[in-house]
Image: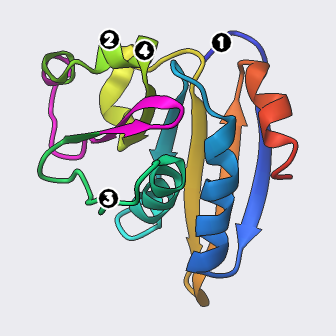
Amino acid sequence: MNSGSPSIFTKHTRSPAQTAALAQNLGPTLEPGDCLLLIGPIGSGKTHFARHLIQNLMTEVEDVPSPTYTLVQTYETRLGELWHADLYRLTSTGEIEELGLSDAFETAICLIEWPDRLAELTPDNALQISFDTDPDQAEARDLNFAWSDPKWQHRLDGLA
């Protein structure tokens, strides 16, 4: 992240439908070169969020599978190319370079699950979204948004 102090806000969702709506509202604010880092344990809603964001940006609705085994799925959207990556199975930054993610960070919208694998390749201008679950409310989520790049503030104002 940039050297400035990070900005943070939390959005509570009570259901998968509310989490999907949040993703659908954020999607149209994105531009090529934007990167969302989706952080959370298995089953926390990262892929669900990504799936609804992607489907909302597509001109023709199609299936949006998890990229767990393919590592990267690419989509043509009305905002340009979008890459959805799941880095869970990767063990080195060299593998990330081989996927072409570094170039995609410059030209495409990127949604990255398990972004800790990026290490020093993490884009400075990325928006982090952490998915926290509540064991007492199985479908509820706290989505914690953190960023240093000032471009995210006005884009997120409508979500707060």
Residue corresponding to mark 4: 107
Secondary structure found at label 4:
helix
Would you identify the image quadrant in which residue 90 lies?
top left
**Earlier sequence position, callout 4 versus callout 3:** 3
Would you identify the image quadrant in which residue 63 lies?
bottom left
CA distance for labels 4 and 2:
7 Å
Q: How many marks?
A: 4
Q: Residue at x 22, y 18 (%)?
A: 100
> Of the residues shown, which amino acid type is indicated by label 4?
Thr
**Earlier sequence position, callout 1 versus callout 4:** 1
CA distance for labels 4 and 3:
21 Å
Side of 79 relative to 61 (left or right)? right
Indicate whether residue 84 is drawn in magenta.
yes
CA distance for labels 3 and 2:
22 Å
User: In the depicted view, which residue is nearer to us: 81 or 98?
Assistant: 81
Residue corresponding to mark 2: 103
User: In the depicted view, which residue is nearer to us: 46 or 17?
Assistant: 17
Residue 46 in view, yes or no: yes
For the residue carrying disc 2, how many other residues have a C-alpha within 10 Å: few (<14), some (14-19), or many (20+)? Answer: few
User: In the depicted view, which residue is nearer to us: 106 or 92?
Assistant: 106
Which residues, given as a range, are shown in magenta? Answer: 75-95
Foreground mark, 3 or 2, reads 3
Foreground mark, 2 or 1, reads 2
Q: Residue at x 21, y 23 (%)?
A: 96
CA distance for labels 2 and 1:
19 Å
For the residue carrying disc 1, how many other residues have a C-alpha within 10 Å: few (<14), some (14-19), or many (20+)? Answer: few
Query: Residue 31: x percent and y percent?
Result: 59, 25
Q: Residue at x 36, y 22 (%)?
A: 119
> Of the residues shown, which amino acid type is indicated by label 2?
Asp
> Of the residues shown, which amino acid type is indicated by label 1?
Asn
